[in-house]
Amino acid sequence: MHAAPSFPDNGRPEGRNATLDAPISGDGWPAVGHLYTVPARQGRAVRLRAGQTIRIINTHGTQVCDTWAFNSEQPNEFMSMEHVRAWIDRTIPRAGDVLVTNRRKPILTLVADTSPGIHDTLIAPCDLDRYRTLGVAVYHDNCADNLRMALAAIGLRTGEVPCALNLWMNIPVGADTGIRWLPTVAAPGDHVDLRAEIDCVVVMSACPQDIVAINSNAPRDVHFIVEPDR
């Protein structure tokens, strides 16, 4: 009988950046109404109560923001793009759409979107192996590690890196089913509002991709604010 193969721990970062040392607070709870920065190439995690709304802002108009959400009570339940696509019968959510978990339960609702509505649910978060295939021989900041570190910075952990809601990522699918990697079509200051349907942790990564053109080859900051209850 052969022993089961040993795989690396997918919850452990493969490198390090300032994400690990700069949470919005020690436990991830935000100051409501405060404008926070997700610095270029880094990630941040924020806790939301059910009913709270987070506004994520494409400050410069050129930046992709990988966005995840995890059930606060069951971290192995998370917003799942595979399940979202089946739930909304589209590849890109629109304002009013409910975003569901891997257990097909609502976790966030996209309540507003001031951008042209071009986002992506198909492409996996960039990781160290992705940059190796692009010819990078040294450590490169990446969204998968930003997720791991942003959670670790507030005392949490994920055992897996789900596919993210890639806000403003422009990946058109052609008639031949081929895809292209294009810059965002958002304008500076465009934002989306996401309302928490359950207590959850939202993680954002200002995507570090600087080789293909999705961030116009120049990663920039994004910002977010947890809005006061209305």
Image: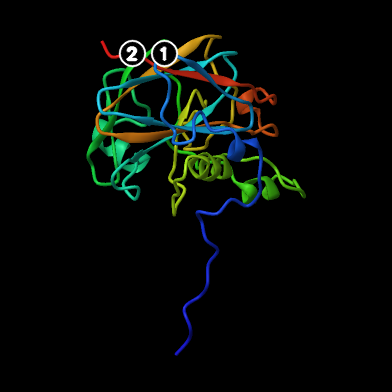
From the image, which quarter does the N terminus lie in?
A: bottom left
Residue at left offset 48%, top offset 40%: 154
> Is 194 situated left or right of 198 in this image?
right
Q: CA distance from mark 1 to mark 2?
A: 6 Å
Q: Estimate the x, y position of residue 80 in percent, counting from the top left.
A: 35, 41
- The residue tagged 1 is 33
Residue at left offset 25%, top offset 33%: 198
Alpha-carbon neighbours of circle 1 within 10 Å: few (<14), some, or many (≥20)? few
Q: What amino acid type is highlighted by mark number 1?
A: Gly
Q: What amino acid type is highlighted by mark number 2?
A: Pro
Labels 1 and 2 touching (C-beta < 8 A): yes
> Is 229 situated left or right of 171 in this image?
left
Mark 1: secondary structure: loop
1 or 2: tag closer to the N-terminus: 1
219 to 10, vertically: above or below: above
Based on the displayed image, in which of its 4 quarters is residue 141 positioned?
Answer: top right
Q: Is residue 181 visible?
A: yes
Based on the displayed image, in which of its 4 quarters is residue 163 positioned?
Answer: top left
102 to 22, vertically: above or below: below
Q: Estimate the x, y position of residue 177 in percent, counting from the top left.
A: 47, 38
Nearest the viewer among 73 and 105 is 73
Nearest the viewer among 216 and 140 is 140
Mark 2: secondary structure: loop
